[in-house]
Image (cartoon, rainbow, N blue to C red):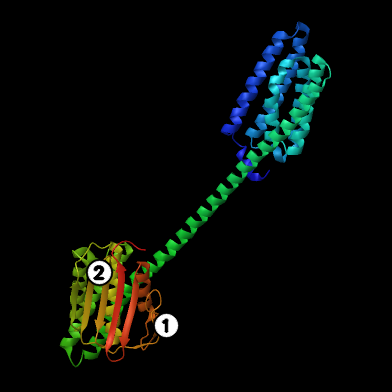
Amino acid sequence: MSNLASKSKTTFSYWEITWIILWILTFVFSLTLSWLQASPQDRFEILVLSMSLALTQIILWKLKHNGQNLMDRPKVGVPLFSIQVVLWVTLVLSSPFWLFHVFSMVVHIHLNLQRRFALGLDLVLFSGVLFQQIELFGFTLLNLSVWVTLCALGYIFGLWMYNIINDSAERLRLLEELQQTQEGLVAAERREGILAERGRLARDIHDTLAQGYIGVIMHLEAADGLRDTQPEKATFHTQQAEKMAREGLKQARQVVHDLRPDLLEKSESPAGALRHLLENWSAQNGIPATLSENGQPSETHPETEITLLRTTQEGLANIMKHAQASTVQVTLSWIGDQVVLDIEDDGAGFVMLDEDDEHGTDLTAITGIDGGFGLQAMQERVTQSGGELHIESVPSEGTTVTAILPLGTRI
């Protein structure tokens, strides 16, 4: 038997406890009847033999309770059961009442020994039955038929017992393999969750701190260039840089505490948060930006709301850096169980080389724009939220970024 079977012997199963009880009952029954029917001079012999039989059985149970698998240790199990068989044959020759105990003996032999050893001891046991019958009735064909029948039944019983043991061991092995597989899946999911969380944090940092620093740098550079010639405009840019720096600090604290974006906390709906975002962006950059809604607004999952906001922030950041646009139009459309975000500008545009892939626009198909982490972060965030990102652009005619997201949880 395998090590898996060995582990199952550490504690007695319901099946094993049942046979232990049966062994004890038949032992007590046989001992009582043989003691009552024996002559005074034979009782001492019966008592010594029966107590020796009980002692060997207690040793066997103790070994099993300590986790020793006698199937894999025939040098221990075979001698002990051989002693038991010899003791029992001696007892049955002294009193026929010990025949009641033979079935319990057979069961425990087959539960604990390999088949070839168990069948060999079966022959000895049933030979004891035959000798006892010969002693009482003499040798007859009936005695021989009973012996052959018992041997055949012992063989069939042994096969049945071993099938049960092997099936139990196989089920235990499969259960342990299933448990190991489940543990592996849990570990893989944990690793995937860690990587996803790292990606989320990277996107959040990019969408907040990185964009804020870019805006601060641009305003400070503009202020530095206008300090001598147009001090009023320089002061404006300095004030805007300070404002963006303070906003970036708030966003940094927000990322650290893994809270919802401040705009969403202050707004009653995603559209309200986007409208507030567009007003601030337009005031900071001097580019008109408006929001329109289509359809009936529906309850939206918090993750989807964050994705709408972050995607709009990234889209506006790209417009500020690359588009040279004069107007921006953002549209929020509620269509069935989806919400569609369109960010459209009338700027310089760029060249699209290929069609969209299954997750949206292939970013490698874009030329004329550096893309960097921004577009990649935008696409990853939308995809992780169960949506698709599409980008359409024509040189000199502008760009439209479309994010299609589910209203509910991630797919």
Q: Nearer the viewer, mark 1 or mark 2?
A: 2
| Residue identified by numbered label 1 | 364
Most distant residue in the top direction: 40
Looking at this view, is 364 or 321 the one in front?
364
Mark 1 and mark 2: span between their CA atoms? Answer: 29 Å
Quick check: can you spot residue 17? yes
Residue drawn at (72%, 31%) of the image: 154
Q: Residues within 10 Å of mark 2 (few under 14, many from 20)?
A: some
The disc labelled 2 sits on which kind of residue? Ile
Could you tell me which secondary element the residue under label 1 belongs to?
helix
- Give the amino acid at mark 1: Thr
Numbered marks: total? 2
Disc 2 target residue: 335
User: Image quarter for residue 80?
Assistant: top right
Residue 23 coordinates in the image, percent (x, y): 65, 24
131 up-or-down from 320: above or below: above
**Label 1 crowd (10 A; few <14 / some 14-19 / many >=20):** few
**Rendered view: 282 above or below 194:** below
Q: Residue at x 28, y 92 (%)?
A: 396
Between 138 and 326, the one lying in front of the other is 138
Of callouts 1 and 2, the N-terminal one: 2
